[in-house]
Image (cartoon, helix red, strand yellow):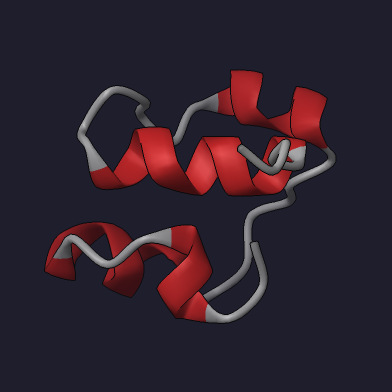
Amino acid sequence: MKSKTLAERAAWAFDRGEMELTSSTRVLGWRPRPTDDVIVETGRSLREGGYA
């Protein structure tokens, strides 16, 4: 199995509802953007948002 990057693992965990978008995600180098609220409300993943 191909190893996944931190962003891919985070997106996968978010898809499964195992990770919430909190300040701890900044450890992965992820930064909030204006569209984050929409992504969270619609249940879309970071990957689908296009900038995981």
Q: Is residue 7 above or below residue 27?
A: below
Task: Name the spot of residue 42 as percent of width and height, x first.
Answer: 15, 70
Q: What residue is shown at x 38% (from left), y 33% (from top)?
A: 13
Classify the position of the C terminus by image quarter.
bottom right
Residue placed most toward the observer, 24 or 8: 8
Q: Is residue 39 above or below residue 22?
A: below
Q: What residue is shown at x 51% (from left), y 67% (from top)?
A: 47
Which residue is outermost to the right?
Answer: 29
Residue placed most toward the observer, 6 or 19: 6
Task: Answer whether residue 35 is visible to the viewer in this image.
Answer: no
Task: Name the spot of residue 24 as percent of width and height, x first.
Answer: 62, 18
Which residue is outermost to the left?
Answer: 42
Task: Name the spot of residue 16 as percent of width and height, x first.
Answer: 22, 37
Classify the position of the N terminus by image quarter.
top right
Q: Is residue 3 above or below residue 47?
A: above
Q: Is residue 44 left or right of residue 49?
A: left
Q: What residue is shown at x 37% (from left), y 26% (from top)?
A: 19
Q: What residue is shown at x 48% (from left), y 77% (from top)?
A: 49
To which quarter of the image does residue 37 belong? bottom left
Q: How many marks?
A: 0
